[in-house]
Amino acid sequence: MSHAQKTPMTARRAASPLSGSVRVPGDKSISHRAVMLGGLAVGETRITGLLEGEDVLRTAAAMRALGATVTRHEDGAYTVSGRGIGGLAEPADVLDMGNSGTAARLLAGILAGHPLFAVMTGDASLRRRPMKRVIDPLSALGATFWAREGGRLPLAIKGAATPLPADYTVPVASAQVKSAVLLAGLSAPGISRVVEPTPTRDHTELMLRGFGATVEVAETKDGGREILLTGQPELTGRPVAVPADPSSAAFPAVAALIVPGSSVTLEGVGVNPLRAGLYTTLAEMGADIEILDERDEAGETVADLTVSSSPLMGVDVPASRAASMIDEFPILAVAAACASGTTRMRGLAELRVKESDRLAAIATGLAACGARVSIEGDDLLVHGTGEPPKGGATVETHMDHRIAMSFLVLGQVTAEPVRVDDGGFIDTSFPGFGALMRGLGASIEAA
Ligand code: S3P
């Protein structure tokens, strides 16, 4: 799909409290991994609840181009028939990863362990994002890369038939980098060792185990994690039930918190502790969030969340929590703008290299809506007054789905409407966002 034309959207103050029980679409991180591991497994992987957002559809298209069979069935389930590790075929054309950093970086890891030539590109946002963070460790394992200045897409890769096992300490807190190295390690003989000083989402490790790989995880003495993966396993296709995405659930959750009188239930949300930082932070701010019926689904923990509107207070969010809520800072900043007192969010350097420079996009957008915001080093400070900001601005989203959704949520409580210049990218992670929010009572329209 092309985004040649922008799709402006407008949010107006909700006329009544939000209410209802909904299931947001499937987890984006888990969906990418299910399709990729399905393509590397022998046999069939049946995926229910797959996120049919553009990012994941790019991964599915890439895996098809590499020889896997990915089929959508009438009931919405997908099946993937894999080629086995090392069995992927050379793609006949350029792989276009669209807006998705996860698709591009994880696929680079898979390609690094296959002796084939491939070229990868993406949209204008993805072509600005740093790929050196995967090029460096994957080159050390034996893959060869050619990339634009600064390690940007498009890039070409010639993978290694037998990469070296990894022994790598991830220098930035990034699940994508960790996962890329582990995926390359699948093709290597012996044990790959990846150390992350800051723990990040562990969906790759959990799912690899589920598919039959041997993955051992130990805590390091300074609170990090050491992951040992035994190379050249035989992965076996298996069913994957994708939980509802906690990063998507964050938007209706914060809307319910800030629109007075609301109560919304979010069903089947993934509550993996390495993704749960937002919910911890909101609870510290005074949010009324009930976690109900916690259960295990295909190796991941899920629960139903009931969120009721609450007066919120500013808090100090430690840098050590940033990785567990890295995609949720835009919507947390919206909650903070409606809270009393200052919220300081520490250690946000990584936000500068997301789908947009999110630190700048949040600060500029909130200021345009009348909130008081400042950036100190890598910290974002939002100074709440206890009343919502006035709104009445058009916010630039810079091809970033989460910036668009965050400001459309803010518009539910501002006196004047909040407009976003382009809601088209919302479909990358949350198809049906507008309709789902309207079903709860929100006022969000194209225009
Ligand atoms: C993701 C990891 C995070 C996150 C992204 C999804 C993943 O990126 O922001 O949306 O699925 O591994 P980084 O690895 O860049 O932190």
Image (cartoon, helix red, strand yellow):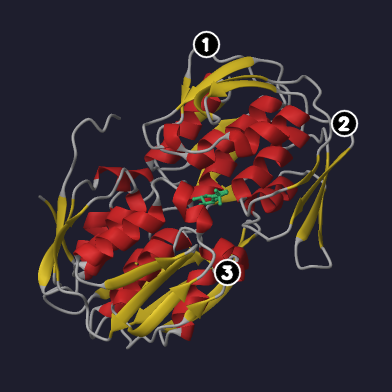
Q: Is mark 2 on a helix, strand or loop?
A: loop
The amino acid beneath tag 3 is: Ala
Q: Is residue 36 visible?
A: no
Q: What element carries label 1?
A: loop
Q: In this view, does 53 lie above or below 339?
A: above
Q: Name the residue under label 1.
A: 92
In the picture, residue 341 is in which quadrant? bottom left
- Left or right of residue 226: residue 127: left
Q: Name the residue under label 2.
A: 189
Q: Do the residues labelled 1 and 2 touch (CB within 8 Å)?
A: no
The amino acid beneath tag 1 is: Ala
Seen from this angle, which residue lies furthest front?
Answer: 377
Q: Viewer-nearest of labels 3 and 2?
A: 3
The alpha-carbon separation of the residues under discs 1 and 2 comes to 28 Å
Badge 2 crowding class, 10 Å Cα cut-off, few under 14, some 14 to 19, many 20 or more, is some
Q: Identify the residue at horizontal 48%, vertical 13% (top origin).
A: 93
The amino acid beneath tag 2 is: Pro
- Left or right of residue 331: residue 88: right
Q: Identify the residue at horizontal 90%, vertical 36% (top origin).
A: 190
Badge 3 crowding class, 10 Å Cα cut-off, few under 14, some 14 to 19, many 20 or more, is some
